[in-house]
Amino acid sequence: MELFVGVPMNNLNNKFFWVVVALTATMLVVGIGGKVFVDRVADVVVERLKQKYSPSPYGPGVDPDKIDMDKIRKN
């Protein structure tokens, strides 16, 4: 039995073949999967940047730059 034309399929060639197949498959999965992962993370970051600004790290709050101190002092 031959693996390729003219190459006998013994244990060494068979193992080498499967190592090459495994490495190739791994590189393809990492290359394609990495691009998909980066695209998804970038989409999440863009969506967060598009959200309305909130000065509070824990949720919506009062923006200290927009407080009218004169109006507060009158009350």
Image (cartoon, rainbow, N blue to C red):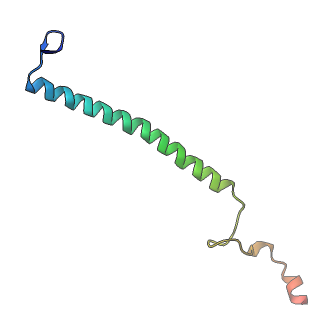
Q: Nearer the viewer, residue 74 or 21?
A: 21
Specify whether 63 is left or right of 21. Answer: right
Q: Residue lying at the far front in this picture: please name it.
A: 1
Q: Position of residue 32 (x, y in %)?
A: 43, 36
Q: Nearer the viewer, residue 56 or 24?
A: 24
Q: Would you place residue 75 above or below residue 32 in this image?
A: below
Q: Position of residue 62 (x, y in %)?
A: 74, 75
Picture quadrant where residue 19 is located: top left
The number of numbered discs placed on residues in the rendered structure image is: 0
Picture quadrant where residue 48 is located: bottom right
Q: Position of residue 44 (x, y in %)?
A: 58, 51
Q: Residue at image x 53%, y 46%?
A: 40
Indicate the quadrant containing the N terminus: top left, top right, bottom left or bottom right.
Answer: top left
Indicate the quadrant containing the C terminus: top left, top right, bottom left or bottom right.
Answer: bottom right
Specify whether 46 is left or right of 75. Answer: left
Q: Residue at image x 74%, y 73%?
A: 63
Q: Residue lying at the far right in this picture: please name it.
A: 74
Q: Would you place residue 2 above or below residue 23 in this image?
A: above
Q: Residue at image x 91%, y 89%?
A: 74
Specify whether 42 is left or right of 71. Answer: left
Specify whether 9 is left or right of 37. Answer: left
Q: Position of residue 2 (x, y in %)?
A: 14, 14
Q: Nearer the viewer, residue 13 or 47?
A: 13
Q: Residue at image x 20%, y 29%?
A: 18
